[in-house]
Amino acid sequence: MEPTNAHNSLQVSITYRQIVNIALPISLGIFVPQLNFITNNIFLGRLSEASLAAAAITGVYYLIFAAIGFGLNNGLQALISRRAGENRPEEIGKLFIHGVGISMLIAIIGIVATYTVSPVILRFSIHDEKLLRQSVEFLRIRIWGLPFLYVYQMRNALLVGTNQSKYLVAGTAAEAVSNIFFDYTLIFGNWGFPKLGFNGAAVASIIAEFLGMAVVFAVIHFKGIGKRFSLFSSFKYEPRIADSIVRQSSPLVFQHAISIISWEFFYILIEHHGARDLSISNTMRNIFGMFGMFSWALAATCSSMVSNIIGQGMQHRVMELIFKIVKLSTGLSLVVCLLLNLFPYEFLSVYGQSPDWIAHAIPVVRVVSSALVMMSFSVICVSAVTGTGNTKVSLRIEFITIVLYCLYVWFVLEHLFLSVTIGWMSEWLYWGSMFTMAYLYLRSGKWKGKVI
C-alpha cells in the first residue's frame, strides 16, 4: 500500500519527482564543499605549481577524516530514514544528539593524530622535504575545522533522513561565499587582511565550515525542526541508541576511511613521479568532486529512500526505485563526460598553469571522465546496499575493491613507473568491481528482512 502524501508525513513515494526533490538540494550541499576545494586550488595554483601539488596531499588527508564523518552520517541517515518510514519522530531527535556526541569524540581523535602520528607517517612517505614541512604545517591548522564539519554532516543526516533536504541550501551557500571571500583575502593579503599564503586556504576553510554550521542551526531553529523532533530537549546518554548508531555506522566509517586512505596512497605514489603529475592529479580530484556531485547526491537519495520504503514494508519495490535513480545518474554523467571531452582545455585553463601542463593533463581528463560514467551507476548500487541496513556487506565490497585497487596502483606507478594516465585507469577497476559485487548482492534478495 502506498503511503499518503500528507504534509506532515515523513514517508516517501517512489516517483521521479520525489527523487529529484530530495536529490537537488543534496547536490547543492555536495557542490559547495567541492567548490571550496576547487576555489582553494585555483587560488593556490596562482601561488605556484608546488602549492597546487601540496594541496593534493593535504586535501586528501583531510578527506580521510571527512570520509569518516561521512560514514557516520550515512549510518545515522539510514537509521533516521527508517524511523521516518515507520513514523516514529520521537526517536529521531535522540539519534541526532547521540550522533553529534559520537562525531565529537572522533574529531578529538583526529586532531590528536594530526599533531602526533601523521607527521611521522608523512615523513616516511613524502620524498620532498619542503613539501613535507608545508603539508604538516598546513594540516595542523586545517584539522581544527573537523568538529564544525562533523556537526555539519550530522545535520545532513537529519535533514535528508526526514525528507527535508531543501533546508541544506542556506548553510551551503553561506559556506561557499565565505570560503571564496577568505581565500581571496587571506592567501594574498587583499583588502587589508594578513597575507598567509598557502596556510591562508586552511584558515579560510575553517571559517567557512563554522559559518555554514551556524547558519544551518539557525535554519533548524527558526523552521521549528528542532522542536518537531525534540533535538535539544534531552542530552541524556542512552546506550541503546548509541549502540545502534555504532553498529550501523562503524562498517561505513571504516569503509569510507579505507577508500580515501587508498586515495592518499595513490597520491603518495604520484608524488614519487614529481610535482607536475601530483598537481595534475589534484585537479582530477576536483573533477570527481565537482562533476560527480549529481551521482553522489542521487546515491545519498537512494540510501535514504531505500531505507524509508523498507520501513514502510515495501521491500518488493526496492529494485524499481534503484533502477529509476540509476537512469537519472547515468544520464547526467554521460552529459558531463561529453562536455569534459569536448572542452578539456577550457576547464583546465582555470588553474592558471602553462600550456605544456594542460597538454599533459588532457589525456588524464579523458580517463577520469569515463570513470565518472562508471561511478554514476556503481555508487547508486553500493548506496542501496547501505540503505538496506547491511553495512557489513558494504564494507566487504569496499575492502575487496580496495585491495585490487592498491595492488594495481602500486604495480603500475611504483613497480613499472608508468604514466599518470595509466595510473588513473585504476578508477575503471575500482568502480567496475564495486558495481559487480553490489549489483549481485541486491539481485540476490539476501537483504530482505534486515531489521535496524
Image (spheres, rainbow, N blue to C red):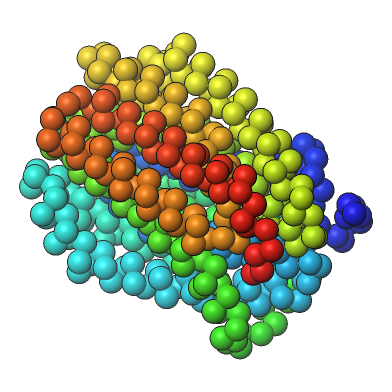
Q: Nearer the viewer, residue 239 or 38?
A: 239
Please tell me which residue is depicted at 52% across the width and 72% down the height of the picture. Answer: 247
Image coordinates of residue 122 in percent, x first then y, are 16, 54
Please say if 107 is above or below 309.
Answer: below
Image coordinates of residue 349 in percent, x first then y, are 36, 19
Image coordinates of residue 306 in percent, x first then y, are 69, 52
Q: Is residue 41 left or right of residue 383?
A: left
Please tell me which residue is depicted at 25% across the width and 18% down the height of the picture. Answer: 360
Q: Quadrant of residue 123?
A: bottom left
Q: Quadrant of residue 55?
A: top left
Q: Is residue 9 left or right of residue 367?
A: right
Q: Is residue 74 left or right of residue 433?
A: right
How many numbered circles does the render carry? 0
The C terminus - image quarter = bottom right
The N terminus - image quarter = bottom right
Please tell me which residue is depicted at 31% across the width and 41% down the height of the picture. Answer: 405
Is residue 77 at least partly visible in the picture? no
Q: Is residue 140 left or right of residue 77?
A: left
Is residue 439 at least partly visible in the picture? yes
Please say if 189 is above or below 158.
Answer: above
Please tell me which residue is depicted at 54% across the width and 79% down the height of the picture. Answer: 243
